[in-house]
Image: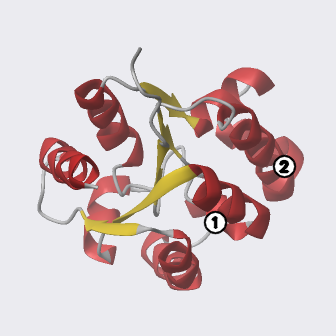
Amino acid sequence: MRKRRKSLALIGFMGSGKSTVGNILARRLGMRFVDLDEVVSRKAGMSVSEIFQREGEEGFRERESRALRENLQERDTVLACGGGIVLRPENVSLLRERCTVIYLQARRETILRRVGGGEGRPLLGVGDVAERVEELMSRREEAYQRAAHLVVATDGRTPEEVAEEIERICLQS
């Protein structure tokens, strides 16, 4: 019988590569992949943008916390968490207790290149995208650092390279 492994949770700012790297990593490790934003959207029957529009950020965060609790029941999972998952201390506690938490860190310039004009990203829909990214990143950086067991830089690297580094680190521990 195969030993059940502790789940991996990818955290970081929008555009840091959580979903793309998570999918690759899960395949490489033979683990289940869960994108929490997709789970929230599917259960709500509407897009993340629509949830933000109808229920506000607080409504989305409540749905996100519920999806996190439900998906942490299983092991052998790679979770791609929403960028704001670290805003609720109870989420951070759960993640740290049940997962190896990996912060995919990217510089502001990298994020701006990846998110473009911010389409489909409700928190970037107001005001100047670059200013909003700077504001949100600086507000969340400390929370990402505190939540993470491991920090992996994604700047100038392909998702495959990032997944390969995480796999190597996980197999060593």
Q: How many marks?
A: 2
84 shown above or below 78: below
Residue 43 vs 82, above or below: the answer is above
Residue 170 visible (yes or no): yes
The x and y percentages for residue 138 are: 51, 85
Picture coordinates of residue 19, whole percent (x, y): 40, 40
The residue drawn where x is 47% and y is 29% is 4
- Mark 1 = which residue? 86
Q: Residue furthest top?
A: 1
Query: The residue tagged with tag 2: helix, strand or loop?
Result: helix
Residues packed near mark 2 inside 10 Å, few (<14), some (14 to 19) or many (20 plus): some
Which badge, 1 or 2, comes first in the chain's sequence? 2
What residue is disc 2 on?
62
93 horizontally vs 37: left or right? right
Please state which of residues 32 and 58 is positioned toward the viewer in this rendering: 32
Q: Position of residue 89 (x, y in %)?
A: 75, 69
Q: Amino acid at mark 1?
A: Val
